[in-house]
Amino acid sequence: MGLVRLQPGTIACFGQLPGTNPAIPGLFPNIFPLATGQFGALPVMPVQAMTQQATRHARRVYVGGLPPTANEQSVATYFSHVMAAIGGNTAGPGDAVVNVYINHEKKFAFVEMRSVEEASNAMALDGIIFEGAPVKVRRPSDYNPSLAATLGPSQPNPNLNLAAVGLTAGSAGGLEGPDRIFVGGLPYYFTETQIRELLETFGPLRGFDLVKDRETGNSKGYAFCVYQDLSVTDIACAALNGIKMGDKTLTVRRANQGASQPKPEQENVLLHAQQQIALQKLILQPGSVATKVVCLTQVVSPDELKDDDDYQDILEDMREECGKFGALVNLVIPRPKPNGEPSPGVGKVFLEYADTDGSSKARSGLNGRKFGGNQVMAVFYPENKFAQGDYEG
């Protein structure tokens, strides 16, 4: 749909002849072209226009981080050229881009493609260099995944020739696909570095995107990530989903489907990761203050604690070493149960000092030290939990 200018001061819609009067005087004249038949003139919206409007949300692409020199023409020309170069044009010959809107103040654009499939192919261009700067290519905020799935492909064609424009699959974040993870319920004060550290408990990330408010730049409380090792995807979801961070509860699942349970052979990895997460939760709490209790990990393994004599030797060594930092009131090293059932806190060492001066020195002196080839992690532990014998936190 569009408007045709006939002469200064005169505008007519497609389908309406100049000089003719509206068929229904006074009722929204000139809004729709008129179809004339035996029942008189009735307003009819062309099928093509209706289809374009219904699919628009799935045909638009958000492009963020544009350089100041960008304009509508340069963006349209560039993305049409790039789409052709990677083999992403599926709607026939011609340019893939039909419209561009730029917000120069906020440095982003909405790029409208000819088809839903071409918009999905454009998702593979995330991180491409435009006028010397890498740009983000995302779905717009009004994108409806459920509705879009009925209109055409929602993922880029895996056979796109990304190498033609200097990209590789996943090179710019790799945040599309079945192993993409949604991480919701993040406290707003968490920094991007803190969130990455938490997620990387399970291994290095191939892509990460903390969603931020476009006006303020502040976190919106959710993120997406993809792991380099896709086999840990379900482990990460199972371990992180439902845990409390500050006043929030995390929702972690595959972005495109329901949560999956880790396989039996992944359980040991999951158990270790959950311990690390529990400790990082303590580190990430806002306003963390020193307590008289310090929790150590990466110091002992469950196998070393099974034999009674070995256990007593470890207790004496830890008491002697950790007593150098202050008056050590109590030392607890949880042991595995004889029947093999899970025992809370196994693999951790708890040190209770007479005052926070001693615990602070212990935390500073022990954190990061190498012990048996492992790097010790030392964090303050809530005194009330320790007093109750709660060693899971």
Image (cartoon, grey):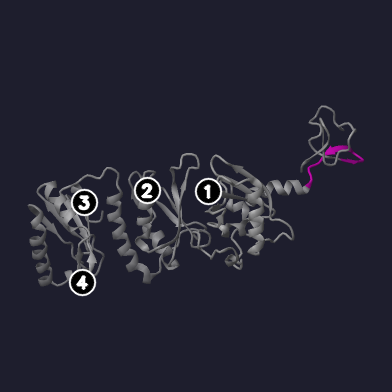
User: Is 90 in front, or is 22?
Assistant: 90
Q: What is the CA distance from the residue labelled 1 to the residue labelled 2? A: 20 Å
Give the CA separation, mark 4 to mark 1.
Answer: 52 Å
Residue 161 occupies quadrant: bottom right
Instruction: Report crowding for label 1: few under 14, some 14 to 19, many 20 or more residues within 10 A (C-alpha).
Output: some
In three-dimensional space, the C-alpha distance between marks 4 and 2, rounded to whole angstroms, equals: 37 Å
Q: Which residue is mark 2?
A: 191
**Amino acid, disc 2:** Thr
**Place of residue 335 in the rendered image (x, y in percent of width and height, measured from the top left):** 18, 65
User: Residue type at mark 3?
Assistant: Tyr
- The part of the chain drawn in magenta is 35-46
Which amino acid, by three-letter code, is at mark 4? Asp
Taking depth in this image into account, of 322 and 235 the one nearest to the observer is: 322
Residue 121 in sight in this render:
yes
Q: Nearer the viewer, mark 4 or mark 3?
A: 3
- Image coordinates of residue 225 in percent, x first then y, are 45, 57
Mark 1 and mark 2 residues within 8 Å of each other at the beta carbon: no
Q: Name the element at disc 3.
A: strand
Q: Residue at x 18, y 71 (%)?
A: 304
Q: Earlier in the sequence, mark 2 or mark 3?
A: 2
Q: Which residue is mark 1?
A: 65
